[in-house]
């Protein structure tokens, strides 16, 4: 009798834990879908920014979670909205623009990060010469993948401005690693002329 009570209790605990995990997963997915939809709607109605006609005053500072644009890699069927920030909450809702890196229409190294098990899962198939588009209110910037590297998480050189590094995508590596990944997968792309 003692054994059967314990088994019933343990089975009930497992069912409750599974239901809680499923509920949390559905809530996170819904939150991400809503954030992506709102960001797409924002981009569709955002006024175009023309670099030559841009105001001479400084633009309003971006806040964490503000929509920036849409990143698209057609060959990989990857399309994700890019939000300001690289914190956990932002990266659950979409790809994150790394603060301190460039943003169109300003030239420089644009840094974008996303989780390897959600938004950037298709990056495992990226190859040199793949095309990337970044649509913002400043227009569509087009890039071509130049190289791919795998580095330790302490290596931040990829964020440094360098000739031919106009867009850098970051995610954890290996893609199928369980837990905090020990390396970073970095995709460098240069702007098309």
Image (cartoon, rainbow, N blue to C red):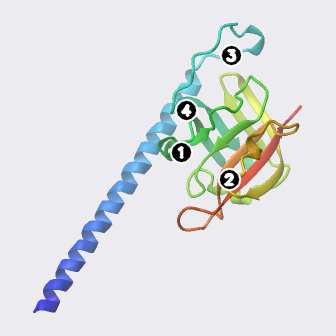
Residue at numbered disc 2: 154
Look at mark 4 in the image and give the residue it sits on. 40
Q: Which residue corresponds to the image point at 37% horizontal and 50% vertical from the top-left? A: 27
Density class for disc 1 (Cα within 10 Å; few <14, some 14-19, many ≥20) is many
Q: Where does label 1 land, which residue?
A: 91
Q: Position of residue 148 (x, y in %)?
A: 80, 54
The first of marks 4 and 2 along the sequence is 4
Crowd around label 4: few <14 · some 14–19 · many ≥20 (10 Å): some
For mark 2, give the secondary structure: loop
Q: CA distance from mark 3 to mark 2?
A: 36 Å
Q: Which dot, 4 or 2, sits closer to the camera? A: 2
Q: As drawn, is 95 to the left or to the right of 103?
A: left
Gap between marks 1 and 3, in whole Å? 26 Å
Give the Cα distance between marks 1 and 4: 16 Å
**Dot 4 or dot 3, earlier in sequence:** 4
Q: Specify which label sits upstream in the sequence, 1 or 2.
A: 1
User: Residue 60 sits in which quadrant?
Assistant: top right
User: Mark 2 Cα within 10 Å, few/some/many (few <14, many 20+)?
Assistant: few
- The quadrant of the picture occupied by the C terminus is top right
Quadrant of res 160: top right
Of discs 1 and 3, which sits in the foreground? 1
Q: Residue under label 3, please give it.
A: 49
Question: What secondary structure is marked by label 3?
Answer: loop
* Front position among marks 3 and 2: 2
Which numbered disc flags the more N-terminal residue, 3 or 2?
3
CB under 8 Å between discs 4 and 2: no
* First along the sequence among labels 1 and 3: 3
């Amino acid at each position: 009798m003692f054994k059967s009570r314990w088994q019933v209790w343990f089975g009930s605990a497992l069912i409750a834990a599974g239901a809680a995990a499923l509920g949390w997963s559905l809530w996170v997915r819904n939150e991400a879908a809503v954030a992506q939809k709102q960001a797409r709607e924002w981009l569709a109605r955002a006024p175009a920014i023309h670099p030559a006609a841009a105001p001479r005053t400084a633009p309003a500072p971006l806040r964490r979670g503000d929509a920036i644009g849409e990143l698209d890699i057609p060959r990989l069927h990857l399309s994700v909205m890019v939000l300001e920030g690289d914190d956990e909450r932002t990266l659950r809702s979409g790809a994150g623009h790394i603060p301190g890196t460039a943003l169109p229409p300003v030239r420089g190294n644009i840094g974008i990060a996303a989780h390897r098990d959600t938004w950037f899962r298709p990056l495992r198939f990226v190859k040199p010469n793949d095309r990337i588009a970044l649509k913002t209110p400043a227009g569509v910037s087009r890039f071509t993948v130049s190289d791919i590297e795998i580095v330790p998480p302490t290596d931040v050189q990829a964020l440094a401005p360098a000739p031919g590094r106009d867009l850098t995508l970051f995610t954890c590596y290996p893609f199928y690693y369980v837990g905090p990944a020990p390396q970073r997968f970095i995709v460098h792309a240069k702007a098309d002329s």
